[in-house]
Image: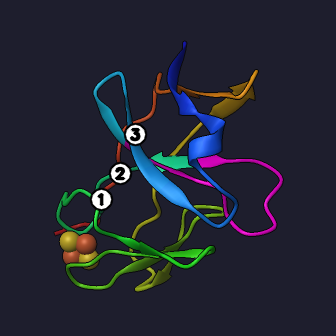
Amino acid sequence: MFTRVCKAETVPEGGMRLVIADNHLIVLAWPDNAEEMKAFQGVCPHSNTPLNEAEFDGTIITCPLHYWTWDLNSGDPVEPQECPLAQYPVKVEDGVVYIDTEGVTPLFAAP
Ligand code: FES
């Protein structure tokens, strides 16, 4: 079931923000040149740290703690190639962003 999270205008192209849907902390991003917004787990797969202080350059998100990086077009890990970010379905209707959390759980690197 899709849950309303925010207005689409709060995420410009090349930007990101954290949102909450159904108690899931979620990174909502609009990567440069992407046709649509993307949503991924909002906690780092390394040690479950919230990614609210993460840097986003329009393509790559960097966790501030140990600088692991992911491509927010896909959620694939860049460096190290340890663990992807879980992705959530997103839709935008009438300027409002909705995310479906059903069946999605954050992924974590093996300790
Ligand atoms: S907690 Fe994110 S890289 Fe270590």
Residue 79's place in the image compared with 105, above or below, is below
Tell me residue 90's x, y (percent).
64, 34
Around disc 1, counting alpha carbons within 10 Å, would you say few (fewer than 14), some (14 to 19), or many (20 or more)?
some
Q: What is the spatial separation of the Cα atoms under label 3 and label 2, in whole angstroms? A: 8 Å
Whether pointer 3 and pointer 2 mark residues with C-beta atoms closer than 8 Å, the reply is: yes
Residue 84 as seen in the image, left or right of residue 25:
right
Q: Residue 19 is drawn in which quadrant?
A: top left
Q: Nearer the viewer, mark 1 or mark 2?
A: 1
Left or right of 18 on screen, residue 77: right
Q: Are the residues flagged by discs 1 and 2 in contact, CB closer than 8 Å? A: yes
Q: What quarter of the picture does the N terminus occupy?
A: top right
Which residue is painted at 34% across and 70% down in the image?
Answer: 54
Q: Which numbered dot is residue 52?
A: 1
Pointer 2 residue? 42
Circle 1: element type: loop
Q: Which residues are magenta?
A: 26-38
**Amino acid marked by disc 1:** Asn
Name the amino acid, label 3.
Val
Screen quadrant of the C terminus: bottom left
Q: Amino acid at mark 2?
A: Gly
Label 3 CB-ligand 1 distance < 8 A: no
Q: Is residue 95 above or below residue 87?
A: above
- Note whether residue 86 is visible: no
- Most extreme residue toward the front, as rendered? 9
- The residue sitting at 30% across, 61% down in the picture is 51
The secondary structure that most of the magenta stretch takes on is: loop
Q: Residue 2: percent from the left, percent from the top?
A: 57, 17
Q: Tell me which label, 3 or 2, sits earlier in the chain.
A: 3
Q: Find residue 19 and name its label.
A: 3
Residue 101 colored magenta? no
